[in-house]
Amino acid sequence: MSLRCQRTALLRRVSNCFAKRKTALPEGFELFYCEETTFPNNLEYPMSTSLAESIVPSITDEDRAARLTNAGAFWTNHVDADKKNAQLTYLVKGYGEGSVASRITAGKHEFFIDEPTGLAGDDVAASPVEIALGALIACQIVVYRLYAQGLGIQIDTIEAKAEGDLDVQGLFGFDDSVRPGFGAIRLNIHVTGPETQARYEELHAAVDAHCPVLDLFANATPVKVELTSN
């Protein structure tokens, strides 16, 4: 099947999905047309007004400080003993399920990634690009905690927001000059605490210099992709 036929089939499936569910497109969606089908061009949709109950255990500031201090001491001694101990390899596996969803396993953890109906999904979980932005936020929070402890900078609360701009012309092959991934990302970190702005700027600089996922987004990483069949 040609790329054009594949694209048309996908768009027709999406259009039929909306029709069968009698679901109106979210406000603010713009449409472009391909033959007799329609497809959302803006994948923004309203954020939930509530958060699910957290599964993360509560912790006191003193216990968090002890954990961060112990982690820093452990890795300092571990790497000082042998530089090879600094080398880590992470393994994550994925299995296709449903229309376009994936079940992901990472060690003992399992979670799902999907797409909204506008990208042929069932919207049962966040999309791959949303998960990527979430990973950036999560890594920033970890590294802020680590370096705040190391620098003696108090953080009372921390939250973050990430926005990514993506042009689907690259995804669907409409224009090969368009990058398939994010063209730009905006990351906002909000911390509260008793320190001066200068101290928080010092922390900001340290985090941006050492955050692994920020480094993934900001710098080219060698990627080797292999396909096996049957």
Image (cartoon, rainbow, N blue to C red):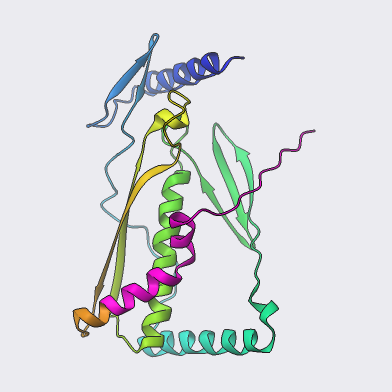
Residue 32's quadrant in the figure?
A: top left
Q: Residue furthest right?
A: 230
Residue 169's quadrant in the figure?
A: top left
Residue 18's quadrant in the figure?
A: top left
Residue 127 rendering spot, x and y as whole percentages: 45, 43
Residues 174 and 138: in front is: 174
Residue 203 rendering spot, x and y as whole percentages: 33, 78
Asked if one can make out residue 60 in the rendered structure from this viewpoint, the answer is: no
Residue 150 rendering spot, x and y as whole percentages: 41, 87
- Confirm whether the magenta stretch covers residue 48: no
Residue located at (22% from left, 32% from top): 28
Residue 78 rendering spot, x and y as whole percentages: 64, 86
Left/right placement of residue 136 relative to residue 205 reads right
Residue located at (68% from left, 89% from top): 81
Left/right placement of residue 110 relative to residue 60 reads right
Is 157 located above or below residue 64 in the figure?
Answer: above
The stretch of residues the image draws in magenta is 201-230
Is 136 located above or below residue 114 in the figure?
Answer: below
Is 1 located above or below residue 61 in the figure?
Answer: above
- Confirm whether the magenta stretch covers residue 204: yes
Asked if one can make out residue 5 in the rendered structure from this viewpoint, the answer is: yes
Residue located at (49% from left, 41% from top): 114
Q: Residue furthest top?
A: 36
